[in-house]
Image (tube, helix red, strand yellow):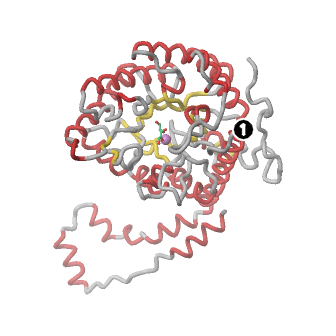
Amino acid sequence: MEPFFTNVGPIPFEGPDSNNPMAFRWYDRDRVVLGKRMEDHLRFAIAYWHTLCTTGVDPFGGQTILRPWLDAGDPMALAEVKLDAAFEFFEKLGVPFFCFHDRDLAPEGASLKESNANLEAMADKALARMEQTGVKLLWGTANLFGSRRFMAGAATNPDPEVFAYAAGQVKAALDTTHRMGGVNYVLWGGREGYETLLNTDMKRELNQLGRFLDLVVEHKHRIGFTGTILIEPKPKEPTKHQYDFDAAAVHAFLHKYGLVDEVKLNIEVNHATLAGHTFEHELAYAAANGILGSVDVNRGDLLLGWDTDQFPNSPQEVALAIYEILRMGGLDTGGFNFDAKIRRQSLDPEDLFHAHIGGMDTCARGLLVAAAMIEDGKLQAAVDERYAGWNGDLGRRVFDGSASLADLSDHVVEGGIEPQPRSGRQEALENLVARYI
Ligand code: XUL
Ligand code: CO
């Protein structure tokens, strides 16, 4: 096998003083932070679709990024060339995991049967590379949005034959993920939404989506897959309105269909911001409700209103997100998947290394900052102090059911109570955060 990334060797850790662009300055995988190795906190994964398949195409222009496996030729032979480059990249970068869509690992065939056979064959080849390199699978997923047949949705399609086709595709992708030792399976509903209510029966579509998820969970148990099923919320793009809009919408959906104990969330930065939230808001909401599973780490662009999927580069932003993750005890089967792509003008194979090294270093710095925030404990102490009143008798009576609405009224009226507002100290806390950066 000829190497593809001929100008780059394994990426070493050289520390913050290094000027070597092909070295980590912060990501030191064996460094122990809060009792755990950095690698085990962050569980980095490479997104096969962006890292290997990005062509630079945008709505105004075609392919700019050239790769041998993107040339014309026998699709299975090209998929293998791509696989070799992928594992060379994973190994040189030193990441523990990758993630894939069925159709970026193996090409679509002339029928579902043929596509499934392609996927099986490529999974065998991937498994061999996984054994050689020790790189593992964080999650697999099915592409239920690219093909023309899914233009009106997959599970939410008006045609039950499309629902069945999608079911068949997910079955194959989940079976394959299981066979490859994947520790999660992701469902991102790329076209599970609508363009116009004029042609949409929303109630029916939601029931279809609930039923589909039920079938996936049932199949997971049938085959003995012990990984986590994850839904990835996104408010829009490609659809005008997507049903799995944000963490709160998915949480309500899981409750309605009785799946809240079966399914968790994969939260993505740029999806959170498209929904009008911060990344840490989505993480905090999911963590507060026990449904945080994994993250797709990337960033958007404040001045562009779409999903730009750029690599993270702000340690402060990432630190606030990791702070939420650490506070909930860390990701269990989840990890940090770089659902991020290089820009249209980033043509060189080396640009892929710069992108991932920067993203990994940003997350590593974010982890160190978040760990300092936890160890110092001042932020948590300020929050504890703010709510301290709830630990008293009144707070206890509200929650143990011993105080009715009338009792609370009496408490205030008879006690002549006038609550005294206290400062929220936002600026002081923001300054405190700035000290850790
Ligand atoms: C699309 C997106 C997907 C999912 C997997 O915005 O984030 O790549 O992560 O289908
Ligand atoms: Co994603």
- Percent from the top left, x then y, of residue 74? 58, 15
Classify the position of the N terminus by image quarter: top right
> Tag 1: residue type?
Asp
**Nearer to us in this view, 349 or 286:** 349
Please state the horizontal and vertical placement of residue 19, each as a whole percent of the image. Answer: 83, 50
Determine the residue positioned at 23% across, 61% down. 401
Q: Is residue 113 above or below residue 428?
A: above
Which residue is more in the foreground, 362 or 88? 88
Residue at numbered disc 1: 348
Question: Residue placed farthest to the left in the image?
Answer: 406
Q: Secondary structure at mark 1?
A: loop
Relative to 377, does residue 229 appear above or below in the rendering? above
Q: Quadrant of residue 53?
A: top right
Q: Nearer the viewer, residue 186 or 331?
A: 186
Towards the viewer: 328 or 95 = 95
Name the residue at 66% across, 62% down.
Answer: 437
Q: Position of residue 198 (x, y in %)?
A: 21, 46
Label 1 crowd (10 A; few <14 / some 14-19 / many >=20): few
Which residue occupies 30% across, 42% down?
Answer: 254
| Residue 428 relative to residue 204: left or right | right
| Residue 156 visible, this orientation | yes
Number of dots carrying numbers: 1
